[in-house]
Amino acid sequence: MRVVIAEDQALLREGLARMLRDSGHDVVATLADADGLLETVQWKRPDLVVTDIRMPPTFTDEGARAALAIKHTESDVGVLVLSQHIETTHAVSLVAHRGFGYLLKDRVLEVGEFLATAERVASGGSALDPMVVSTLLSPRSDGPIARLSERERGVLELMAQGLTNAGIANRLVVSERTVEAHVRHILTKLDIAERDDGHRRVLAVLAYLDRAHRT
Amino acid sequence: MRNLHVRSWPAALFAAAATIELVAAVLSWGLEPKWDTSLYAVYALAAAGAGTLIVSRHPGHRIGWLLVATGVFQSLASDLAQGWGLRAAEHRWPGGAFAEWVALWSWVPSAIVIVLTFLLFPDGHLTRRRWQAVVWVNVVGVALTLPGWAMDPSLDDQFVGGRNPYAFRSASIVLEGLGMPLLLGSVAVAIVPLVQRYRRSSGVERLQLRWFVFASVFAAIVLPVSALMWNTAPAVRLLPALALTAMPVAAGVAILRYRLYDIDLAISRTLAYAALTMVLAGTYAGAAVALGAAVGRSSAWVTAGATLAVAAVFRPLRHRIQRTVDRRFNRTRFDALRQMTGFLDDLRAGRAVPEDVEPTLRRVLGVDDLQVRLSLPHGGSTVDLSGTPVADDLAAGQTSWPIRHAGTLLGTVVAPGELAERRSLVSKVLEAGSMAVEIARLRVELRHQLDEVEASRARIVAAADDERRRIERDLHDGAQQRLVSIGLALRHAQHTLGSGDVEVSRTLDDAVAEITVTIDELRELARGLRPAVLDAGLGAALHELARRAPLPVKVVADSRRFPPDIETAAYFCACEGLTNAVKHSRATKVVLSARCRNAALLVSVADDGIGGAAADRGSGLTGLSDRVAAYGGTFCIHSNGTGTTLLAEFPCVS
């Protein structure tokens, strides 16, 4: 993968670049802020952009805004936004775009999982941090989610995180057919229409969870 | 006198009068009583001096020129002529009888001066043209009386030689018989326009007229009285000269310096002391007669006893007489002080507030645009009675009066300059009302200090919130990122190491896992301090809060922004309310709302639980109440069997 990194802290920026290089990826550019990120992307045409969400000058959501700008002009470039803390509002709205990921920053320490997620986003998939998903899925006494079995909840979480059926099967160490069966059951119980497209499925699940949470 | 530049013409005339008087005094010195010489010289010079000053300030002022002319004429025709007459008789100089003769009729033209002064005072103009007739009648009267008087043989004994050298009996009788009625009649009629003028007058003119009328009445009483007692009590011979001197002095004061002296006070004091003197004299005489009958006429006990009696009644009598005189003749002052006392009684009884002192002063002093300005201690800013800062300067035509209470300067009263005419009244009224001003000032000071304390409380809370925000940033952007970097370094080491040493690789895995746990803990810590999502607004933060809640939470909030301090405080209100609902209320659902109403942010947390929450029980809710109050907001909890509603209102302009 050709990767562009935007991260204001030098140590972390270099650490990330080194980790990606160690794993055989090509880091084509590193930036210390969100200024010029879009131009760099248009110039270097990377497969993936990894960007911090809080960067100079205001340290609020510069990274997120730059990510949206990239998505609007270069929609085929995968964007993975890293955040220091969970924040569902930004996360859910960002992941509505194809090829978009939102992870807590320390997820990079689980190198294998991080790289798998990064590749999924680069190839047009979605990724939502497990912590965000579990917040959305927080135990509630009422509602259809309470009717799901333990295993089905696990599958729903991974679906929401953006994993494909194969990815879920891999993670849970079961066959892909078993996962398919679980997914069917879940979608029926939650009354969500079956979708072939992985991204659309994620969106549908997230929209459902978000709605369930707001009411 | 800043603006007074003495003009050369009147100054020259004054100097001439002074020189003539000096010569006259030298001539008559020792040939008549010395007080006679000096007092009439003083009278002539007072007239010339007052006239000179008036003409210097108001060039062309007829009263001024009239007084100058009187002074010069008096010194020349009366004093110098008399001096020459006396001295000439002594040394057998020529023209002595002629000079005596001039001095004897020299009083006659002063009738013209009196009539003109009555008609022209104080502005030098007639009120109506028709009064000119009075002047002409008077002039005719003077023109007839003067030769009549001059030829009067009955004045023979006034001459040193014992004979009027120009006596002509029959002509004198005819001329005096025709002139005198005209002269005296015109003087009497001239009083009419003066009285009319006084009645119609107000403000400055009234004050000026009072001075003049005061002096005229004094002269009108003193002159006949002293004439009556001329031979019985020689001491009264001084009085006519004093009364005459008082007239030009009063005219001068009235025209030039009426603001400086309080005529009402002068009148009331004169009357009070005159009455007091008469009563005391009566007391003394009565006591002396009574004691004399008892212990014998010439005993020293009589004097002592009478003195004692007078001393005993002096103090209470003085107060009572002054009060009676004030009630009769100084009504304004009497009423003003009574109204002010009434206001203070109302204040004590709680029927009035101390801030009413301003309308009371306006009413009492009869001015509409009067303002009380307070000077606050420690910092000394100037404020009005409501505590609003005001400029400490005077507009054109305004005067300010200090208000003091127990030696402390409380502030000033700013009023139109006309009030300066009643200087003494104003200071008396202010003295009486100073207690109300003191209370008003204390109230303003208290309010200011309370505002100060509230502001400082808000600053302290804001500082604490800023500090939380800073720590939160430090945790997220400092410690947390550093830990991720260290983790990445460890992963790099692990990668470099390859699959060679399983033991080391496992240790590194454990270390990275430990770092991950630490980061999670830091994240939780930071979120408790201040959620970073508040940067995206109160609405976003409330939605985030709702998502984390273990029960259904409905959020009613839009993306409107408020000042960061207010948003933080509002967020913690919602947070604490929600925690309370989750922990204690057994609620099944909660509604969080943040609305803007009437320039205020209204935050509410409503649950459907069992109720029982109160701000004074839970320390969390008490702290919340303090936090809201720190921003000048209000906080309340309604809790009953069907649920709890927590309501916080923050004032904010948005």
Image (cartoon, rainbow, N blue to C red):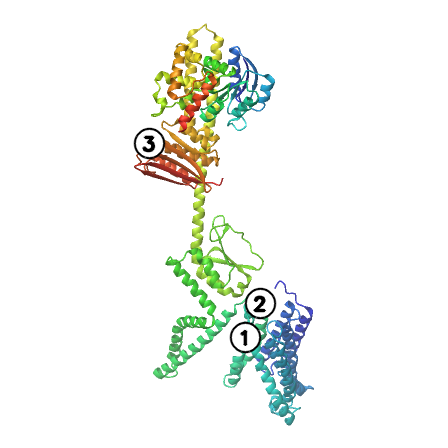
Amino acid on which disc 2 is placed? Arg
Which chain's residue wears label 1? B
Percent position of residue A209, x then y: 41, 24
Q: Are marks 2 and 1 on the same chain?
A: yes
Mark 1: few/some/many CA within 10 Å (<14, 14-19, 20+): many
Which chain's residue wears label 3? B
Q: Earlier in the sequence, mark 2 or mark 3?
A: 2
Farthest bottom residue in view: B170
Q: Earlier in the sequence, mark 2 or mark 1?
A: 1
Q: Are marks 2 and 3 in contact (CB under 8 Å)?
A: no
Name the foreground residue: B644 vs B161. B644
- Dot 1: what SS? helix
Residue B73 lies in what quarter of the image? bottom right
Percent position of residue B225, x then y: 51, 82
Distance between mark 3 and mark 1 Cα atoms: 92 Å
In the rendered image, which residue does mark 3 sit on? B587
Residue B398 lies in what quarter of the image? bottom right
Which dot, 3 or 1, sits closer to the camera?
A: 3
> Would you place residue B310 above or below residue B1 in this image?
below
> Would you place residue B340 above or below residue B499 in this image?
below
B551 horizontally vs B22: left or right: left
Instruction: Using the image, tell me which numbered label, if any, was put on residue B213.
Output: 1
